[in-house]
Structures are given as structure tokens and as C-alpha cells.
Amino acid sequence: MPSDITQSGVPIVARPVNTHRLRFDFTLRVWLTWALLLIALIGGLQHLGLDFALIRAKLPFMLGLHLSPNGFVQGVVLTILVTAMSMVFAVGLAVLTALGRLSRNPVAFAIATFYASFFRGTPLLVQVLLIYLALPQFGIILSALTSGIMALSLNYAAYLAETIRAGITAVPRGQREAAMALGLSPLLIAVKIVAPQAARVIIPPAGAQFVSMLKDSSLVSLMGLWELNFLAQSYGRSTYHYMEMLLTAAFIYWGLSILFEIVQHRLEVRFGRAYGATRG
């Protein structure tokens, strides 16, 4: 057993560190701090004189428990729908753009860099309005929902492409060479060798971008879609209680963001097990 000798000659035995106890103590202190901050926040809101009866009356509509007057989903349900569909299209387009950025074909490289530069260099609000208002000038008429999903997908795919490219380049070249020496096909190398290792680098920044997309989905309210932000502003104008409606929307967005962050953390743990650098 490892030990050390003090000046008095008494041996000191080194005890193993209880990692489970340290992890439990850390988690407990985190939750206690969160609880105290949440109590302080609620206490501060109590002094604003909010009309909680109005919040309870409008909350089911903002949560999407009722359909809009035209029979379509509204509130949180519509927000999640727009965000989820935009995520799917953004990931697919981002992968293609990242591969174009890594390509030795000058045409593919030029198209990928031009696209990424344009959509990263112009405001998302301008892109939403251009897609919704400018495309009809060329005979392309899209619904408000399709226009919003397209704008979010194109914008976030441009940013996500750089994240994916960084993840791919972070995988050591020797991994690919070893797989090629074993006779694996390029597709199998990409799926089984490169993707799992790149995911560890991609997931944290990609998760942050998806949380931002959730909040930026509020821009589709400019096109008259009855999503969460649109309802909050409409109810605020009609009742002259803007603070209640905006705070309700803010807390709902916050709750959705926490759910996204939990999923992101679980994915980080799953893909980081082999490296032992992520807390479970």
C-alpha cells in the first residue's frame, strides 16, 4: 500500500479518492445553487404585480393545447414543429456543405464557400423576408411555414457546416488509413470510423446552435404564423398585459431549451465515454 513518512516517522497511508462521492457532492451543490437562484427569481417576479389569472387563462393556448382559428397547430407545438423540421434539413445541408468545403473539386469548394459566406454574412431576419417576399417575384410562391423552415435551415446549415468540418478534420488521418488498410469501403469508413469520433467534437457547438434555432424560430411570427412569440405579442396587445405574456413565453422557451440541453448532455456522455472526459 502506498505511504509517505512524516518527519516524526509516522507513516501516512494514501487513501483512494471516492469519485462517486465527489460526483454526488458536486451534483448536490449544483442543484442547491439552482434552487436558490430559482427561488430568488420567483421572489423578484412576485414584486411585479403580475396577473396570474390571465396567465392561467392564456397558457393552454400558448402551450398549443388548442388549435388556431384555421384549424392548424399553434403556440409551442408550432414552435417545436418549425424547429424540428429546420434541424433535419439543416443537418443534411450542413453535411453536404462540409463535404464541399473539404472537397478538392474547385466547383464544389466554390459553391460550398459561396453559400456559407452569404448565409453567415447576412442577417437571418433579412433572409426570412427575402424568401417570403422576393421569391414570388420569380414565380416561386411558398407558404409562410415553408418559408420559415427554409430560412432557418439555410441559415443554420451554413454555421453547422463549419462545426461538422471541424469535427471531421479533428479525426486523426491515421484512423482512415488504418481502415483503408483493412479493406473497408469509403462509406463504411465514414459511418463507422469518422462519424463516431467526429460526433464528440460536433455535438457541443451543434447543440448550442439548435438552442439558438429554437429561439430564432420566433421570427416566423413576422409571416403571421401563430407560434409562441406571435401569441405572446397578440395577447399582450389585446389585454394590455405585455409583461405577463412575454414572461410566460420566456419561461416556456427556457423550459424547451433545458430539454434540448439535457438531450445534448446525454449525447456528449454517450460519445465521450471512450475518452473519460464527460461527466455522466
Image (cartoon, rainbow, N blue to C red):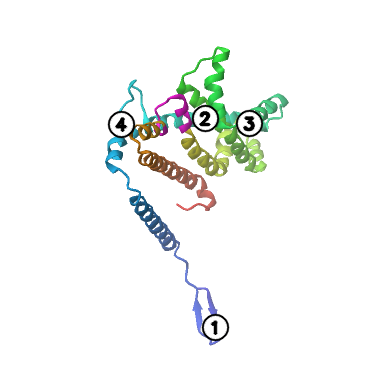
SS at mark 4?
loop
C-alpha span from label 3 to label 4: 38 Å
Residue 175 x %, y %: 63, 42
Residue 101 x %, y %: 66, 32
C-alpha span from label 3 to label 2: 13 Å
Residue 96 x %, y %: 60, 28
- Quick check: marks 1 and 3 in contact, CB under 8 Å? no
C-alpha span from label 1 to label 3: 64 Å
Q: To which residue does mark 4 refer?
A: 65
The mark that comes first in sequence, 3 or 2, is 3
In this rendered view, identify the residue nearer to me: 163 or 187: 163
At label 2, the amino acid type is: Leu
In this rendered view, identify the residue nearer to me: 8 or 46: 46
Residue found at x 49% / y 26%: 148
The mark that comes first in sequence, 1 or 3, is 1
The mark that comes first in sequence, 2 or 1, is 1
- Start and end of the magenta stretch? 218-229
Residue 140 seen in this snapshot:
yes
In the rendering, which numbered label is found on residue 6?
1
C-alpha span from label 4 to label 1: 70 Å
SS at mark 2?
helix
The mark that comes first in sequence, 4 or 1, is 1
SS at mark 1?
loop
The image shows residue 40, relative to residue 118, as above or below, that is below
In this rendered view, identify the residue nearer to me: 20 or 50: 50
- Identify the main secondary structure in magenta: helix
Residue 185 seen in this snapshot:
no
SS at mark 3?
helix
- Quick check: marks 3 and 4 in contact, CB under 8 Å? no
At label 1, the amino acid type is: Thr
